[in-house]
Image (tube, helix red, strand yellow):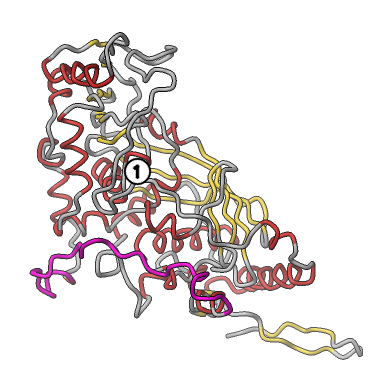
């Protein structure tokens, strides 16, 4: 039941206006799963049941129904689903398409198209000694983290301010159930042995929202290295010393001797320059994505409003936007679980109808090939997963089957749980691993559909 709020008409007579309905993406973390007529990345809506179970069992906070904290948590969870699994931008309902952008640590804002192309992991992690988006495409980035940690739950811990500029602290956690395999900022393959423990990170986000509490400019601050410190708490335990007196090609050939057992073992934690680091000015080749044919993290320019446009927004429009969002928050707080729910459509077409054809950002990201095998029957595609399904069984297999690539460096060093080893950039092991992780087989599509 919608409540009526008394308002003055300026003549001393009180009038009533219906309280605003609450958008479904604010009321439920699973709202966008029900969207009809949308394009899903793997042919159907993902299943987050296991991640939701991890969230229920491991969360620290219990937010009241209709509270600002609950609505912020639900909004971000629905946005994450859209960013990960809706490759057609016009299907996104949780953002204001005219003014949306995403930035990490005060860096350059990126468009929604950029995140659709490179993936959410590559959109938030800066290049480092364990992982680099420059050497990982969409498929390999998801394989890197999903194979290691099948579920990655998320919750809001605190909200510091309400609309139109919402600031909040969050937590992201899961369990390292299998080995980490990724590619670092030097193009090396990094393997960290699974320790079975929790990976638990926190960050802070400031997000501007519109009058319907849709996301506009998002800025997030976190320490991406904290996740890798927890993945490999004992650090990298092998490095191959590179001979600086020979040509690069020869040095790379020599570096592959790691596969012959010539390993220099050293504990890296707390040390300065690492053995085997690239020389100053040395250019390391970036991975060319198998799916796009370009550098894996090629930037797509931001398509939102320019700084000049943002500065020209008049105060009246900002005030109306703030009042609309605050009215929704106040209504939800007063009605709690009894709130009326609305299902607002995407405003993509509203914000692009005044643009010429060459100004309209692409609303679709088409993969080079359909990741769903047409030979799969309709029944097989739509069959709901059980509590323990083929994905669980796959991840419970030995690491040699979960990660079907060469493991010469790992065999030669025999790292313990929590230790990481490195295979050289120019080694055959690294090349073959890149190829395998950039391919997406039909059977792996469901494997990538339960994350957060």
Question: Which quarter of the rendered picture does the N terminus lie within?
Answer: bottom right
Locate residue 323: give its quadrant: bottom right
Residue 22 seen in render: no
Residue projecting furthest to the front = 247
Instruction: Name the spot of residue 172 as percent of width and height, x first.
Output: 43, 45
Describe residue 321's horizontal placement relative to residue 30 as left or right.
Answer: right
Instruction: Name the spot of residue 442 as percent of width and height, x first.
Output: 15, 59
Numbered-mark total? 1
Instruction: Name the spot of residue 116 as percent of width and height, x first.
Output: 39, 58
Residue on which disc 1 sits: 174
Task: From the viewer's side, name the closer residue of 200 and 270.
Answer: 270
Residue projecting furthest to the right = 11
164 over 245 or under it: above or below? below
Locate residue 386: give its quadrant: bottom left
Start and end of the magenta stretch? Answer: 354-381
Residue 123 seen in render: yes
Q: Residue at x 74, y 71 (%)?
A: 317
Residue 371 is one of the magenta-drawn residues: yes
Locate residue 31: give its quadrant: bottom left
425 over 335 or under it: above or below? above
Q: Is the magenta region chiefly helix, strand or loop?
A: loop
Q: Residue at x 34, y 43 (%)?
A: 174
386 over 38 or under it: above or below? above
- Does dot 1 land on a helix, a strand or a loop? strand
Instruction: Name the spot of residue 438 as percent of width and height, x first.
Output: 23, 47
Which class describes the residues within 10 Å of circle 1: few (<14), some (14-19), or many (20+)? Answer: many
């Amino acid at each position: 039941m919608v409540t009526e709020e008394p308002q003055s008409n300026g003549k001393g007579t009180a009038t009533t206006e219906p309280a605003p309905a609450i958008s479904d993406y604010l009321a439920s973390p699973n709202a966008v799963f029900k969207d009809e007529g949308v394009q899903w990345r793997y042919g159907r809506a993902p299943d987050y049941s296991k991640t939701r179970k991890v969230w229920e069992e491991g969360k620290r906070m219990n937010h009241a129904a209709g509270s600002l904290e609950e609505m912020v948590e639900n909004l971000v969870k629905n946005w994450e689903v859209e960013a990960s699994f809706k490759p057609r931008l016009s299907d996104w309902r949780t953002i204001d398409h005219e003014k949306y952008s995403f930035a990490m640590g005060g860096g350059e804002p990126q468009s929604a198209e950029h995140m659709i192309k490179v993936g959410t992991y590559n959109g938030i992690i800066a290049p480092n000694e364990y992982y680099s988006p420059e050497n990982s495409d969409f498929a390999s980035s998801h394989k890197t983290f999903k194979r290691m940690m099948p579920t990655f739950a998320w919750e809001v811990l605190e909200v510091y301010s309400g609309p139109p500029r919402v600031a909040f602290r969050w937590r992201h956690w899961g369990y390292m159930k299998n080995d980490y395999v990724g590619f670092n900022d030097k193009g090396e393959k990094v393997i960290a042995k699974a320790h079975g423990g929790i990976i638990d990170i926190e960050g802070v986000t400031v997000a501007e929202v519109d009058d319907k509490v849709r996301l506009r400019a998002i800025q997030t601050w976190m320490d991406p290295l904290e996740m890798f410190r927890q993945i490999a708490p004992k650090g990298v335990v092998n490095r191959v010393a590179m001979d600086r007196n020979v040509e690069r090609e020869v040095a790379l050939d020599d570096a592959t001797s790691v596969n012959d057992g010539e390993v220099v073992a050293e504990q890296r934690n707390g040390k300065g320059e690492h053995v085997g680091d690239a020389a100053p000015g040395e250019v390391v080749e970036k991975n060319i994505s198998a799916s796009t044919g370009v550098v894996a993290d090629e930037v797509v320019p931001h398509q939102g409003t320019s700084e000049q446009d943002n500065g020209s927004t008049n105060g009246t429009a900002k005030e109306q936007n703030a009042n609309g969002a605050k009215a929704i928050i106040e209504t939800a707080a007063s009605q709690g679980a009894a709130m009326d729910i609305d299902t607002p459509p995407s405003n993509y077409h509203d914000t692009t109808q005044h643009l010429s054809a060459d100004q309209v950002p692409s609303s679709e990201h088409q993969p080079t090939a359909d990741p769903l095998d047409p030979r799969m029957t309709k029944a097989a595609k739509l069959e709901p997963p059980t509590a323990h399904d083929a994905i669980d069984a796959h991840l419970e297999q030995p690491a040699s089957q979960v990660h079907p690539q060469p493991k010469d460096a790992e065999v030669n060093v025999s790292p313990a749980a929590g230790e990481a080893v490195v295979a050289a950039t120019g080694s055959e092991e690294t090349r073959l691993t890149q190829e395998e992780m950039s391919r997406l087989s039909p059977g792996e599509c469901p494997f990538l559909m339960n994350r957060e």
